Image (spheres, rainbow, N blue to C red):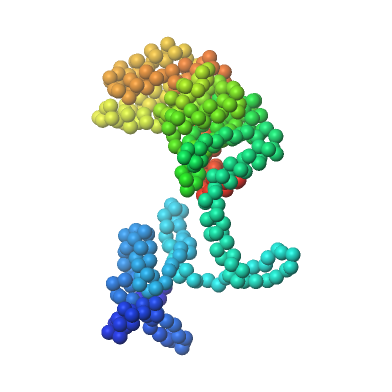
């Protein structure tokens, strides 16, 4: 970047700016004799070298304001980040910077043209405009076609006010996975797929090698009880069989839907989501607790809540003693967690086949983490096409 130049704007320059701002430039000459033109801009809008603009957004706003008064547009060019992922440098260019590359076209008659000459510059933009207007319909059409030609593929979808609200699908591989590994299933809706904020919901099981297998997938508009009821009813319509156990986080809408749709499946809450709250709840209940006492509490607490070999009566006795020892018997959160103990403590799932396979939704969340690789797919049909 060149050293900052300060211009004294003359009355003539001001008159030029007021009458024809688009041509308000000053001709300059480099030491080597080359000519270049610099826009005449009020000093108030000139970038100042060494000045701290606060944030990247404020810096960008400053440069856009300068570009506006200099009568050109800018675009982001790239950035450099540190290992901590903090941005060290960010680049902005004039929107006309760069030279279009020559492009070869695979046509019947081989020709060599500049991309701008044949209008491909705006091809992606025009395609996106077309897709945006029919994105949902294209996705449904794609699934209808797949259902027609791919054996074992099934899907359901729901419309609200002529807009796609939810869609659920499973192919033959997913159905085979569910047939063999339907003991314990988890599902989690944490990853938004696209500009429409549809949430991607993978249903995850565990195979005989203790690896994740996807048994179904869906996209839903919101996380209401009604949406989850539709989702689970679609699940039952396609599979016709409930899992032995289903693991979710403490989402109340999920709990309502599971209770209404599934009649025999046991609903288990994710222990990880519960256990991560324990340290803060101890501090809230006893702000003056010493570090050694807190460490002792966590050790004893973990021994009883993660133990899958003790009977429910033994668990209750140990829990009561632990609460007494640390004066937590009247704490509302620990009382509530004891009241719902049958939905998360392993001792209450001993009679459920293969209950030890999954105690958290971490597998679903790791599946979601994998699918974030497709975060660049901002259209529903594009996202589905890359799965």
Tell which of 306 and 112 is nearer to you: 112
**Which quadrant of the figure contains the C terminus?**
top right
**Which quadrant of the figure contains the N terminus?**
bottom left
Q: Image quarter for residue 40?
A: bottom left
> Where's residue 93, x and y in %?
46, 68
Q: Residue at x 57, y 18 (%)?
A: 353
Tell which of 24 and 322 is nearer to you: 24
Q: Residue at x 56, y 23 (%)?
A: 243
Question: Does 227 appear above or below 15?
Answer: above
Q: Is residue 337 left or right of residue 146?
A: left
Tell which of 254 and 180 is nearer to you: 254
Inspect this view and state whether residue 44 appears.
yes
> Where's residue 327, x and y in %?
28, 20
> Where's residue 307, x and y in %?
47, 20
Q: Residue at x 55, y 32 (%)?
A: 203
Give the farthest residue toward the front. 161
Q: Residue at x 52, y 35 (%)?
A: 158
> Where's residue 228, x and y in %?
48, 30
Inspect this view and state whether residue 7 appears.
no
């Amino acid at each position: 970047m060149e050293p900052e130049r300060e211009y004294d704007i003359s009355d003539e320059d001001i008159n030029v700016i007021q009458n024809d701002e688009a041509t308000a430039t000053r001709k300059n000459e480099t030491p080597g004799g080359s000519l270049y033109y610099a826009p005449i801009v009020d000093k108030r809008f000139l970038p100042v070298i060494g000045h701290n603009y606060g944030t990247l957004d404020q810096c960008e706003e400053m440069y856009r304001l300068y570009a506006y008064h200099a009568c050109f547009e800018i675009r982001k060019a790239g950035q450099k980040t540190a290992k901590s992922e903090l941005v060290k440098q960010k680049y902005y260019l004039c929107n006309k910077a760069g030279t279009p590359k020559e492009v070869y076209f695979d046509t019947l008659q081989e020709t060599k043209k500049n991309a701008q000459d044949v209008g491909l510059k705006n091809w992606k933009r025009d395609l996106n405009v077309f897709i945006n207007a029919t994105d949902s319909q294209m996705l449904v059409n794609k699934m209808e076609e797949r259902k027609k030609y791919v054996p074992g593929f099934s899907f359901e979808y729901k419309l609200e006010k002529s807009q796609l609200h939810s869609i659920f699908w499973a192919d033959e591989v997913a159905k085979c996975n569910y047939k063999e590994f339907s003991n314990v299933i988890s599902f989690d809706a944490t990853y938004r797929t696209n500009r429409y904020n549809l949430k991607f919901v993978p249903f995850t099981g565990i195979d005989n090698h203790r690896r994740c297998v996807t048994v179904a997938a869906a996209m839903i508009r919101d996380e209401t009880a009604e949406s989850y009821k539709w989702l689970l009813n679609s699940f039952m319509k396609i599979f016709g069989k409930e899992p032995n156990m289903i693991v979710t986080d403490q989402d109340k809408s999920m709990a309502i839907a599971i209770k209404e749709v599934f009649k025999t499946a046991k609903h288990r809450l994710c222990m990880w989501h519960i256990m991560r709250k324990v340290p803060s709840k101890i501090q809230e209940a006893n702000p003056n607790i010493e570090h050694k006492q807190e460490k002792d509490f966590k050790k004893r607490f973990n021994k009883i809540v993660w133990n899958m070999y003790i009977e429910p009566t033994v668990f209750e006795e140990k829990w009561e003693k632990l609460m007494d020892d640390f004066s937590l018997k009247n704490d509302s959160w620990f009382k509530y967690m004891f009241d719902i103990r049958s939905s998360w403590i392993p001792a209450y799932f001993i009679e459920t086949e293969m209950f030890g396979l999954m105690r958290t939704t971490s597998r679903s969340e790791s599946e979601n983490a994998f699918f974030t690789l497709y975060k660049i797919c901002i259209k529903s049909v594009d996202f589905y096409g890359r799965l």
